[in-house]
């Protein structure tokens, strides 16, 4: 009887989806492929001229007197500084402004630190990044396999599955705080940065970041403790 039950359990377990192999979510890129991808993304932002950008800002409620053309000192490019106060920003569409910032390759600047932070934390930036990462996962046929939080699963358990997916040892890439909050450990970031040419370490960190954004795991990062997390989007 006991043997029969064990056999039944083994068969039942086999009917469920098997855990993906270690490193299944790492998609290696050659330096040439990575460079081509970055160039394509940059060119999207170059399609919006400064004149177009000014007109779009005016359409979204920015006043002509609030737009100042300037030279960004670090790279010598012409930018539009939008001098609005937090009180003014509360009457504007922050997501639309964030979208313009992305569409123009960040040729919009907000001199007010509070305004700049509010735009940087807008839902639009998160939504676009998530859509991009989902597209990558789907292009590899992994959307149904990527680790997600299961009913009743702890954050610690999910973190270990994400690390396995991205070819990290357990506990080496994601720090878990109070079994509720997450944080990147320094190791995956440091090893990726130290690569003279982006290679395997960068590919693994890309996997980690991609999974965090695509599955909305970013909501559980400790930076949102005591703050409003990004909204939950339907898949």
Image: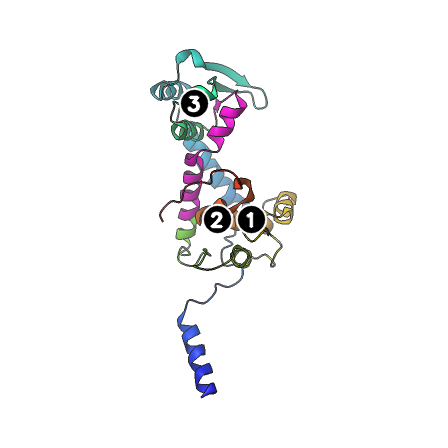
Q: CA distance from mark 3 to mark 1?
A: 31 Å
Q: Which mark is residue 217?
A: 2
Q: Nearer the viewer, residue 78 or 180?
A: 180
Disc with the residue nearer the chain's start (3 vs 1): 3
Q: Within the magenta stretch, is there residue 129?
A: yes
Q: CA distance from mark 1 to mark 2?
A: 9 Å
Residues at marks 3 and 1 touching, judged by CB atoms closer than 8 Å: no
The correct choice, above or below, for 170 with respect to 107 in the image is below
Most frequent secondary structure within the magenta stretch: helix
Q: Which mark is residue 109?
A: none
Residues at marks 3 and 2 touching, judged by CB atoms closer than 8 Å: no
Residue stretch rendered in magenta on the structure: 106-135
Q: Nearer the viewer, residue 69 or 59?
A: 59
Q: Which mark is residue 182?
A: 1
Q: Within the magenta stretch, is there residue 211?
A: no
Residue 160 makes an appearance in the image: yes
Q: CA distance from mark 3 to mark 2?
A: 28 Å
Expressed as whole percent of the image width and height from the top left, the position of residue 95 reads 40, 31
The correct choice, above or below, for 175 with respect to 116 in the image is below
What is the quadrant of the N terminus in the image? bottom left
Q: Residue at x 53, y 42 (%)?
A: 225
Residues at marks 1 and 2 touching, judged by CB atoms closer than 8 Å: yes
User: Badge 3, how many Cα within 10 Å: few under 14, some, many 20+?
Assistant: some
Q: Residue at x 42, y 24 (%)?
A: 90
The secondary element bearing badge 3 is classed as helix
Q: Kindly identify which residue carries mark 3.
A: 89
Residue 29 makes an appearance in the image: no
């Amino acid at each position: 009887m006991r043997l029969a039950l064990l056999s039944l359990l083994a068969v039942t377990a086999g009917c469920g989806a098997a855990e993906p192999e270690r490193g299944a979510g790492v998609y290696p890129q050659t330096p040439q492929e990575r460079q081509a991808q970055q160039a394509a993304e940059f060119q999207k932002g170059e399609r919006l001229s400064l004149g177009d950008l000014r007109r779009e800002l005016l359409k979204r409620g920015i006043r002509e007197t609030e737009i100042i053309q300037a030279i960004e000192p670090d790279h010598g490019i012409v930018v539009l500084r939008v001098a609005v106060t937090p009180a003014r920003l509360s009457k504007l569409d922050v997501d639309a402004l964030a979208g313009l910032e992305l569409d123009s390759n960040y040729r919009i600047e907000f001199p007010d630190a509070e305004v700049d932070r509010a735009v940087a934390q807008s839902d639009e930036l998160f939504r676009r990044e998530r859509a991009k990462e989902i597209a990558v996962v789907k292009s590899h046929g992994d959307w149904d396999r990527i680790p997600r939080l299961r009913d009743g699963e702890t954050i610690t358990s999910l973190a270990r599955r994400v690390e396995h997916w991205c070819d990290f040892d357990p506990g080496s890439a994601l720090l878990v705080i109070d079994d509720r909050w997450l944080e990147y450990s320094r190791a995956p970031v440091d090893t990726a940065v130290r690569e003279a040419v982006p290679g395997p370490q960068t590919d693994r960190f890309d996997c980690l970041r991609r999974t965090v954004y695509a599955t909305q795991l970013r909501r559980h990062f400790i930076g949102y403790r005591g703050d409003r997390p990004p909204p939950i989007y339907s898949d």
